[in-house]
Each structure stands twice: as C-alpha cells, then as structure tokens.
Image: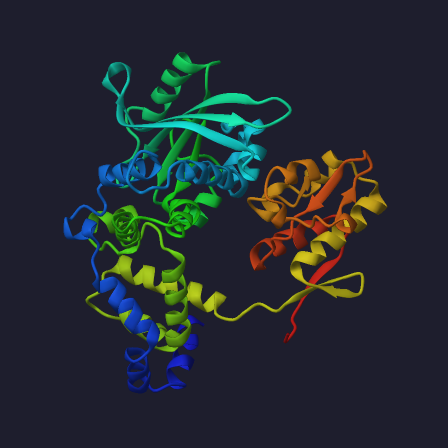
C-alpha cells in the first residue's frame, strides 16, 4: 500500500521540474542561508556540550547579567514549569511537585520578584554537584502581603543518563536542609520531543518529585518571549546563536543514537520547514522511496525511512470524518460532549462512576472529563468551558469535557461508548 502511494505520487510529477522549483523556492533559500550560518557554539564544537547549555541557562536566568532582562526570565521560567504540569500526563500522578497555591499568582503575575541568586555546579554533601541552583524570593499580593522563598534545583541531561541516583540525592539533601523554610521545586531538563514528554506516565529521572521539561519548552516559553524584549546587541546575538545551536542538526553517531539530532526549533524555522515540506512533498517522498531501496543504506536506516513513509502516508490527507450519534453528525470533539451529556442525564451518573467508565487514558494527557475546579487550575483551553457546556453529575459536581480529539483517541472513545450501549459510528465526508 505504501509503495503504491509513493508510486502514484511519482507518476504525477516531473522530478527534474520539481527540483528546479525546489532550488528556486523562497523557503529553500531561507533555510539554506539559516543552516549554512553556523552558530558560535557549532564553530567551537560545543553545541551538544551539557555544561555549555547549563551555562547559557544560568546566564539567562541571572538578573545581574548584561542581557538587561532583570527578573523577566525567572518569571517566564516559572510559567514554563506550570505549562509543563498542564500538558504532561505524568503530573496527574503527583500534583504536589509544584506549590499549588502559587500557580494562580504566577499565571496572573500578581507577585513581585525580590531577589534571584544563581549558582552553577553547587557542591553539596558527598561532593555532589547540582547543575543549576536557583534561590528566588518573591512577594505575593493578596489580602496580606506574603514573602516566600523558593529553592529550585535543576538537573540538565543532554547526552548522559542519570547516574548514582543523582536526582534522589539532591531531593533528599534539599528536603533535609530547607524543609519548612523554603518551597522546593525540582526540575529535570532533557532534549526529548514534545510528544515523548506529553506521553510520559512518569518522569525519566529516578526521583519522581521533579518536573520534567524539554528544550522545546525552553524555546517556546522562555527564549521566544525574551527575544521579543528590548535587548542589548550582544545579548540578542548570543540568544540567536543559541537558537541555531538547538535547531542545527547534529549528525554525529553519538547524537543520532541518543535521538538528539535536533534539540528544539523556533517559530520562524518551524513555519519555514512546514512550508518547505508542503511545497515539495512529492519530491521529498520520491527521495525517501529511492533511499529505502538503496543497497548502501543499512537495514536499520531502511526501516526508519519506511516508518517515515508510513507515517506520512497515514497522515497525508486531512481526516474529514465525522461521528454519527442519535441520527446526527458531529465533529470528533463535539460528539464526545454529546455522548457524555446523554450518558449523565439518562444514567444519573456520579462523577466517580463517570471517571471509572471513561478513564483518562482514553483521551490521553488531558483526560476525557475533569471537574471544573480542576480545569480552572490547569488549561481551560483544552475543555468545553462555556456556561452552557458545563455538565453536572448526579452528585452535583460540575464537570468539563475535553475538546482535544483526533483520529486515534476518538476511536478509543467510540469503542468504550459502544460497549456502554451508546451507539456511535464514524462516517466519512468530503468536507
């Protein structure tokens, strides 16, 4: 089937003509210019050096450095951690890894940073070294002003894996030294992809009290906002170089085995690459099809290429299918709301019963339904939250239905709904 798909594409275009178009496209020239311009990190041969990345982050988060961002970066860093908790499946198992009472203050900005101190390679007992140690003092504005101290311990991993139970040792040290005196926040930074991060059932570090984030979060929630600020020329140049360092493909054997070819990518590059793909898809697919039959390509690489083609094939056309429920057609996300509304009203379900019948893993990281109070403190954009869309269970708990549904998870939902006597079917449509 995959071969037929690629062969059909090959028959419908002239390869030589497509190559000329590719080499003259705006996206090609912009990408070539960008990727031919090496960052200072690459020139020095240190773009995947763990210490270099930790040094850059420590520099960026330090308000006393010459970037002129003062406390802006630590505020964005805290927001980034909260976003990770909103998005990642593992956080549902341990909601205490970030001080819950601080979340709303940080989101609304209703607080003031009084002081930030950054320390690299902080030495603790048994000569262990914390990658980045951050001491933050904030003032919260409420009915009464409160001053709070945060101790943030960040462990950064680029190539290496955790050894000697580092995260557990840092956690035990901090709990012993600061428990009751400071709020403790532990961060585990790795270069895995967003999809991998979202789907983690538990953090990859030994200690499960850490908030795991990736470098894409650093780009999206820290670097991109910083780049939009008024910066000194030197700081702007360094941040731009760091962007290229993260996105420049590293093709050495060690990097490829670790899966860290690209660590993160910024918005401009993402748009350019997507436009480049859409404009040259037939040619690029033909190239992949040739490569997978090349005798010079080893078996593992051929399998990877075949998997890429398979993924492209299954996702190449936009899915316009709808769902039929009680004689009406609904979009995939909307049918979930309709089914649950029917189920609650006819079966008089309690919240616990509903959660038991429609388990979180059916949807994925957000869950099928959550209480409104829970959603307000997480990410309301992922749920139907208009007053008319809020449902109430038989035990008077107001709930919100998730609106994040695609081809894969809607099929899981339909299977469960049908097993409960709620007849839902997928129907194809042209629009």
Q: Nearer the viewer, residue 76 or 123?
A: 76
Q: How is the structure coloured here? A: rainbow
Where's residue 165, x and y in %? 32, 24
Q: Nearer the viewer, residue 379 or 90?
A: 379
Which residue is located at x 43 percent, y 63 percent? 311
Using the rendered view, name the quadrant where residue 328 is placed. Answer: bottom right
Where's residue 149, x and y in %? 45, 22
Q: From the viewer's perspective, tell me whether residue 358 is left or right of residue 22.
A: right
- Image: 246 above or below 132: below
Which residue is located at x 80 percent, y 61 percent? 326
Q: Nearer the viewer, residue 107 or 188?
A: 107
Using the rendered view, name the quadrant where residue 214 is placed. Answer: top left
- Image: 13 above or below 313: below
- Image: 421 above or below 394: below
Which residue is located at x 32 percent, y 49 percent? 263
Where's residue 286, x and y in %? 34, 76
């Amino acid at each position: 089937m995959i071969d037929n798909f690629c062969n059909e594409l090959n028959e419908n275009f002239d390869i030589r003509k497509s190559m000329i178009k590719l080499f003259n496209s705006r996206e090609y020239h912009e990408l070539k210019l960008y990727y031919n311009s090496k960052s200072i990190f690459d020139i020095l041969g240190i773009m995947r050096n763990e210490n270099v990345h930790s040094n850059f982050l420590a520099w960026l988060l330090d308000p006393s450095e010459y970037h002129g961002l003062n406390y802006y970066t630590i505020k964005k860093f805290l927001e980034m951690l909260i976003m990770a908790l909103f998005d990642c499946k593992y956080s549902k198992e341990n909601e205490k890894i970030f001080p819950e009472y601080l979340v709303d203050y940080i989101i609304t900005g209703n607080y003031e940073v009084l002081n930030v101190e950054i320390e690299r390679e902080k030495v603790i007992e048994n000569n262990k070294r914390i990658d980045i140690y951050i001491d933050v003092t904030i003032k919260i504005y409420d009915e009464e002003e409160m001053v709070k101290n945060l101790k943030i311990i960040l462990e950064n991993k680029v190539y290496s894996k955790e050894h000697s139970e580092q995260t557990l040792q840092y956690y035990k040290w901090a709990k012993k030294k600061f428990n009751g005196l400071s709020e403790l926040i532990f961060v585990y930074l790795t270069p895995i992809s967003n999809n991998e991060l979202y789907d983690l059932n538990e953090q990859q570090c030994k200690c499960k009290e850490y908030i795991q984030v990736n470098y894409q979060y650093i780009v999206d929630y820290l670097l991109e906002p910083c780049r939009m600020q008024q910066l000194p020329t030197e700081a702007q140049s360094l941040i731009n170089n760091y962007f290229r360092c993260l996105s420049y493909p590293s093709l050495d054997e060690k990097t490829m085995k670790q899966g860290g070819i690209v660590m993160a990518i910024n918005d401009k590059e993402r748009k350019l690459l997507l436009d480049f793909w859409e404009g040259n898809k037939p040619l690029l697919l033909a190239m992949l099809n040739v490569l997978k039959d090349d005798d010079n390509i080893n078996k593992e690489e051929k399998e990877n290429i075949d998997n890429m083609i398979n993924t492209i094939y299954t996702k190449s056309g936009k899915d316009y299918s709808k769902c039929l429920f009680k004689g009406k057609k609904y979009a995939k996300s909307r049918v979930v709301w309709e089914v649950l509304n029917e189920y609650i009203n006819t079966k008089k379900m309690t919240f616990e019963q509903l959660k038991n019948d429609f388990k979180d893993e059916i949807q994925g990281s957000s869950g099928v339904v959550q209480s409104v109070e829970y959603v307000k403190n997480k990410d309301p954009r992922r749920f139907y939250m208009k007053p008319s869309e809020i449902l109430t269970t038989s035990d008077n708990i107001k709930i919100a239905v998730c609106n994040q549904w695609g081809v894969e998870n809607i099929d899981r939902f339909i299977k469960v709904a049908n097993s409960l006597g709620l007849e839902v079917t997928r129907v194809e449509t042209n629009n």
